[in-house]
Image (cartoon, helix red, strand yellow):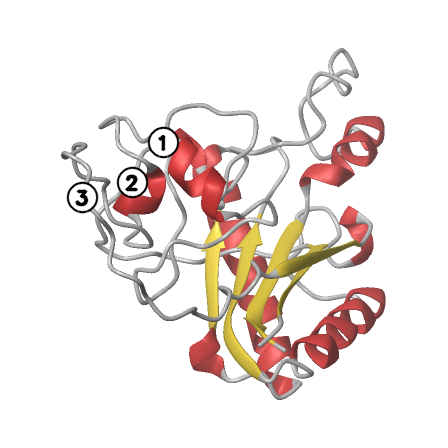
């Protein structure tokens, strides 16, 4: 069976993973799973490690956790290889069907301000249009496993306020997706607050750090975003 993953960046917040065991990976240029803050592997509500678009069998064997074992072992997708033993003659075995290919990935990006305006958690008409397209694409999957919505905020305001704002944005997106026919128990939300900006240092030295500074508000638009991912088989 051919598998596919759908990714959409829009503007969201609020997935709480629960009290699952955390898997911390060592830094690597390419990761087989979705990595959150602190190099911790993201999981779905069932405790399964969430695959990235770079996922492959070789990669889950080569990337190591802080324990020094392949991340695929910690995620329960491969067994830790035993120490080499003396070679023995292998009995002939019947040919087996090749393993299914890793899910292909497709990614679509929407402007950061298409869904949420500054200091708002209300969906705009443009944002609803983009999310409706995402919901329609997700429903073409033969089996939808999970939809993950991660919301973000810019740095203006206190960290506590921005954390709640990012969670409200994710919740607003979840409500809209459910209204489009996506099962509520398939949608998980998470808020990252202001902790994962994408603007870097481009908005420095623009004056006062407040919402009345239009230049700064406009410059930080990309940080007011939502990352949306649907995982399933087609």
Q: Residues within 10 Å of mark 2 (few under 14, many from 20)?
A: some
Q: What separation in Å lies between label 2 and label 3 (alpha carbons)?
A: 36 Å
Asked if disc 2 and disc 3 are in contact, CB closer than 8 Å, the reply is no
Q: Looking at the image, is 91 positioned above or below residue 143?
A: above
The quadrant in which residue 93 appears is: bottom left
| Secondary structure beneath label 2 | loop
Camera-side mark, 2 or 3: 3
Q: Nearer the viewer, residue 100 or 9?
A: 100
Camera-side mark, 1 or 3: 3
Q: Nearer the viewer, residue 82 or 108?
A: 82
Which of the two labelled residues, at mark 2 and mark 3, occupies the earlier sequence position?
2
Q: Is residue 170 left or right of residue 208?
A: left
Q: Quadrant of the C terminus?
A: bottom right
Q: Which residue is mark 2?
A: 23
Q: How many marks?
A: 3
Q: Is residue 93 visible?
A: yes
Q: Is residue 71 left or right of residue 98?
A: left
Q: Nearer the viewer, residue 102 or 46?
A: 102
């Amino acid at each position: 069976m051919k598998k596919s993953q759908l990714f959409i960046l829009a503007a969201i917040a609020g997935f709480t993973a629960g009290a699952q065991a955390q898997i911390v990976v060592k830094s690597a240029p390419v990761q087989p799973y979705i990595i959150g803050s602190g190099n911790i592997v993201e999981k779905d509500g069932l405790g399964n490690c969430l695959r990235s678009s770079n996922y492959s069998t070789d990669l889950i064997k080569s990337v190591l956790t802080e324990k020094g074992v392949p991340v695929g072992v910690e995620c329960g997708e491969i067994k830790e290889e035993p120490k080499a033993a003396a070679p023995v003659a292998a009995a002939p075995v019947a040919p087996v069907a090749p393993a299914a290919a890793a899910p292909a990935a497709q990614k679509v990006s929407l402007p950061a301000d298409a869904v949420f305006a500054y200091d708002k958690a209300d969906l705009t008409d443009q944002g609803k249009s983009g999310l409706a397209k995402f919901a329609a694409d997700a429903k073409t999957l033969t089996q939808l496993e999970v939809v993950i919505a991660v919301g973000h905020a810019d740095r203006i305001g206190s960290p506590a306020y921005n954390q709640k704002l990012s969670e409200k944005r994710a919740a607003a997106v979840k409500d809209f997706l459910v209204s489009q026919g996506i099962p509520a128990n398939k949608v998980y939300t998470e808020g990252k607050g202001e902790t994962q900006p994408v603007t870097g240092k481009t908005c420095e030295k623009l004056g006062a750090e407040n919402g009345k500074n239009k230049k700064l508000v406009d410059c930080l638009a990309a940080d007011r975003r939502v990352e949306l991912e649907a995982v399933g088989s087609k």
